[in-house]
Amino acid sequence: MVGQRFLEALAERGGSWRVTVLCEEPRAAYDRVHLTSYFSGTRADELSMVPAGFLDEHGIDLRLGDPATSVDRAARTVTARSGEVFGYDALVLATGSFPFVPPVPGHDAEGCFVYRTIEDLEAIESWARTATTGAVVGGGLLGLEAAGALKAMGLDTHVVEFAPRLMALQVDEGGGAALRRKIEELGVTVHAGAGTQEIGVGDDGRACAMSLSNGEKLDVDLVIFSAGVRPRDQLARDCGLDVGERGGIVVDATCRTSDPHVWAIGECALASDGRVYGLVAPGYQMAEAVARELTDGTGSFTGADTSTKLKLLGVDVASFGDAHGTAEGCLEVLYSNSREGVYKKLVVSADGRLLGGVLVGDAGSYDLLRPLCLSGAELPAPPEQLVLPASAGAPVAIGVSALPDEALVCSCHNVSKGAIRSAVTADGCADVPSVKKCTRAGTGCGSCVKMLTTIVRDELTANGVEVAKGLCEHFEHTRAELFEIIQVRGITGFARLVDEHGTGSGCDICKPVVASILASLSNGHILDGEQASLQDTNDHFLANLQRNGSYSVVPRIPGGEITPASLITIGEVARDFGLYTKITGGQRIDLFGASVDQLPLIWKRLVDAGFESGHAYGKALRTVKSCVGETWCRYGVQDSVGLAIELELRYRGLRSPHKLKSAVSGCARECAEAQSKDFGVIATSAGWNLYVGGNGGMTPRHADLLASDLDHDTLIRTIDRFLMFYIRTAERLERTAPWVERMEGGLDHLRAVIMDDSLGICDDLDELMQRHVETYEDEWRATLEDPDRLRRFVSFVNAPGTPDPSVTFVAERDQIRPAKPGEDGAPLPTAGLIAGPTLEVRTS
């Protein structure tokens, strides 16, 4: 990563350097920060950091799998493993680090791994298929990520940490205790204060056990060592460059080594402040410093911010500044709530300036506290008010405006608030993408994008630029404002709304939004009267439009529970209509390839068999996934299937700003993946834990724990209010994850609103949900019973019953698939009449 950043920085600054890159790995630079996402489906090529054409455009010669083996400093040559010799004027070492493996007996047995490269992860994934119990040696950042990966693969997971607490470098004793409680609640067993003495090896040469220094013995069949890293400085040692006493290539403030023609950057370098940095942001700053040094001689790196914010196993953890309170005369302000799993500590100076902090369980204030700490500015409020949750007193909501210009917003690229403001004011950037391109802020780890967006908006507003907040050109109101208008004024149609509160006749943006709000408030049939014309294509035909113009049908299967008879019905329908069938990850059976004309015929068969619409086409509740729970699973502690069915039937058809997904897991093993859903429930021995704001997709996010050990009725009531508050206040196409993230006060505010009724709206939210539950009607059953609604299901208005001949298919693996361009596909076979003896003519 650091090497790639150097190449980019050098390319941006121009110059006449001809660059050769000797790379040990078989692939170009990739994102190691998000390496764990490989286990959640991210492909190796998706982690690549090298833009297409970048190397050719800049004439960079990349040699994969051919690392440097020696350096002749006198001759200024590097010899690669292939034997090829390269001359140089400037040599940049970005050899990184290697994982440290304690030299305990058995450490090299089969089944022992490190966690460093994609190849490491591939090997772990392969081994885990036949493993049942895994252990991670090391409870630091990477160790906990590795533990999360093992747990996600279904292994009983242990973490062995030599220090007395997890993440000992980043968090203090209180934070470590809170983190441990949260991690153990997730089913990971933590052995802190224990060293690994031996890896037991079976007769087959495979790891089978671990002996710990506290006398414990663990039966394991997979071990991951994540006990720290060491600088890869052997190449430098061999050629006589100065290295530190504990490793690391010694460099000066320009990242130059003891040889004036050689530089070192990243984890292999011992910086001029005496530190070897193991984070990517300092590495990036070193890379940019050397690029400047090689182009105009102005490079400098003398130290970097080591603040950290991560979500480990779904738990927010952050530390910044003097997290351990080592400064003379410093004071600590603490908030700890072990019931909620929240720990917050601020370290302040005697004159009230913020020196550092630790946040566990709720790191929502990190984006503002860290820049305040780094800037040395005065706190905008007493520190105790900055750590209290909304429900525990009168909180002070500090905004971005409280930050000084020198506050560092993007640590990855060292971009300050002032630089972002300047990009808007001086460089004319009018939106976030332009500012990203101009400053590189938000293009690293991405954790600062939310703050970046706020700063850009504030600066545009301050410059007199009107920042449009309206839904579209027809409404100057946001979706949340339109919801309130429609509800308070009792508006039941689009025409009245646009007449009284908008302009024009509407568009593809505002019409579906208004249709969704009307459906949320009235729950009438979406194809009735004026509402029918507001729907987008999918809702218009109550089915998902696919790439070749055909549609898919998805019957609801609550909780994934289905009888053999129902399975046979779906199979018979698919066979009779020649549909492609696929079992989805959401416990559904998709039926693909239906023409518009066939949709009512297919649904007639399904409705008669007791199925109803799964709403896969709408911005509505999709699925409530479940594991088998205590009914079948020997680890289950609650009836997850029963609860999943109850939730899905309760919220079926609920229209919302975006699709909603949910899951219920019967125990902490989390087989239903509830923490990746908009709302997820995990059983405990005392009740149910409720998580909110998770999602998969392009920007996956673990859900946050909203409440613990809820009884059944409290759980249902809390979910009711959460969903209705979301539907009422979210913006267009805003999923619950960004909605929760942008909420001022975050989870604390959400809890205060829906659990403590801080806004006095809970009765209203309860009433809205109760109305939805009582008035729900299956849209497809109602459609089949209404000839007027059925008339829209034709490919040609003037030839009802005639399928669209342009919708064609080819056979593949004994099923159909859409024909690709150039393929001679055939229309979907139909058993009925193509056209009647007389063609019915309609004019609309």
Image (spheres, grey):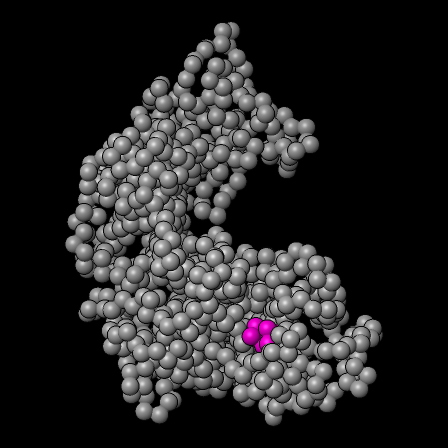
**Residue sitting at 39 percent across and 77 percent down?**
375
> Any magenta on residue 412?
no
600 and 753: which one is in front? 753
381 and 219: which one is in front? 381
Magenta span: 283-289
Whether residue 414 can be seen here: yes
Considering only vertical position in the picture, is 762 above or below 70? above
Q: How many labels does the image show?
A: 0
What x and y, as percent, mark residue 558? 37, 43
What x and y, as percent, mark residue 678? 37, 53
28 and 818: which one is in front? 28
Considering only vertical position in the picture, is 219 above or below 683? below
Considering only vertical position in the picture, is 23 above or below 470? below
Please identify the dominant SS of the magenta region. helix
- Give the image quarter of residue 512: top left
**Residue sitting at 44 percent across and 76 percent down?**
307
What x and y, as percent, mark residue 524? 28, 32
**Residue sitting at 52 percent across and 30 percent down?**
550
**Residue sitting at 29 percent across and 49 percent down?**
729
Relative horizontal placement of residue 118, taking residue 377 as reference (left or right): right
341 and 82: which one is in front? 82
What x and y, as percent, mark residue 138? 50, 78
Considering only vertical position in the picture, is 594 above or below 736? above
- Considering the image in quadrants, where does the N terminus appear? bottom right
- Give the image quarter of residue 178: bottom left
- Considering the image in quadrants, where does the C terminus appear? top left
Relative horizontal placement of residue 408, taking residue 755 as reference (left or right): right
Whether residue 177 can be seen here: no
Relative horizontal placement of residue 571, taking residue 252 as reference (left or right): left
